Amino acid sequence: MRSTFLPFSPPLIGDEEIAEVVDTLRSDWITTGPKTKRFESEFGQYVQAPAALALNSCTAALHTSLVALGVGPGDEVITTTLTFAASVNVIEHVGARPVLVDVEPDTLNMDPAWVERAITPRTKAIMVVHHSGHPADLDALRKLAESRNIALIEDAAHAIAARYKGRPIGSGNNPVAFSFYATKNLTTAEGGMLTGDAEFLDRCRLISLHGLNRDAWKRYGKEGSWYYEVVTPGFKYNMTDLQASLGLVQLRKLEAMQARRREIVAAYQEAFTPLGVFQTPVARPEVDHAWHLYVLRLWPERLGITRNQFIEELKARNIGTSVHFIPIHIHPYYRDKYGFKPQDFPVAYDSYERMVSLPLSPRMSDQDVADVMEAVLELSAVQA
């Protein structure tokens, strides 16, 4: 048994990131400025995006997208129940109705067949979530959106470095929101990025900073002007140069960090798939999986232990875990407001009751990975 606790997903921060942040602290600019602009440019190039806008969270990127699209009261937005609350909260924030759908049994992504059945004359947008870093069935979802003149928004919080049929997630003209939270494949501690059509992002940029027609960098620099105008009641969603400093270095390391994630996943798959007591994650042939998460689903009747007991046993062995996610439709706010029942979305609910996310981070040593596998295999043997 480990003598120290292994966190679920610790960030990998090195001396290069620290030096870049110190450089910013010693500069004349620590809020949104030159490094944020560089980060937007370099990230946009990495995902082959038409344009990119750095923000303070993925939530901000999703909210700004909905506002820029004009989604509001009387509208509906279709999304998955198997996601984090932020994906759905922003729909509530703009006064629209979230319409939840079930997921595919293998990828845990929203099922296009459910989406098609959920479309009504009030549907304004489809918000697709790339669960765990596995791209959703974008061809089917784009076809549905385009045939009915519905906007397609991608919640790519898990999907940095993912590809769908050879194209990076974020390379299209539609809005795509990324997360740089501490546990993500690339971190700025907190932060996000919105990619998409350049003209659309110009509107989003305005909305994301109080609705001002000049940001602080333009106002306070040598060539700037004190004069600005508020053209819409916007938000305070800008990224700082301190955050961008982390992002610039993390972006340079991303491919190496992704390679390490794939190594860990390969070891997990080899160890756990043959046991017959787990449903291990998949990667369809048309995608490059980002492997933000490694979600193991137990077969409790074969394993002889519930998901909750499994998590507690791993914790007792100093292995941290998480669950992705508690379905939206069983959270009290959404359950009570919309009258959802657990079995309304059977695939998502069944998966939730069986799932556990194992530690997955490029910071993990070979010994860390071995400890996780030993603990899981020990539980499998004991219970079987």
Image (cartoon, rainbow, N blue to C red):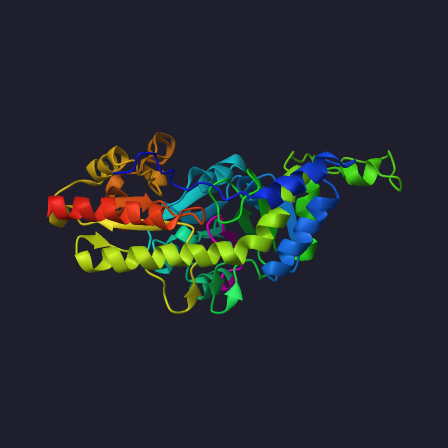
- Residue at point 25%, 36% (across, down): 317
Q: Nearer the viewer, residue 94 or 191?
A: 191
Can you tell which quarter of the image residue 31 is in?
top right
Q: Is residue 166 above or below residue 117?
A: below
Question: Residue at horizontal 65%, vertical 52%?
Answer: 52
Which of the two residues, 197 or 380, is positioned nearer the viewer here? 380
In the rendering, at what x and y percent does residue 7 appear? 38, 38
Residue 55: say if magenta.
Answer: no
Q: Quadrant of residue 325?
A: top left
The verdict on residue 155 being magenta is yes
Q: How many marks?
A: 0
In this view, the residue in front, 352 or 35, is 35
Question: Which image quadrant: the N terminus?
Answer: top left
Where is residue 57 drawn, in percent x and y? 56, 40
| Residue 218 at x, y percent in the picture | 81, 41
Camera-side residue of 219 and 377: 377
Q: Position of residue 79 (x, y in %)?
A: 42, 48
Task: Say left or right for 319 vs 242.
Answer: left
Q: Is residue 273 left or right of residue 238?
A: left
Span colored in magenta: 146-159
Residue at the location (70% across, 50% down)? 38
Look at the image and tell me whether residue 349 can be seen: no
Using residue 26 as the reference point, say whether residue 377 is left or right of it.
left
Q: Is residue 272 at all visible to an observer of this figure?
A: yes
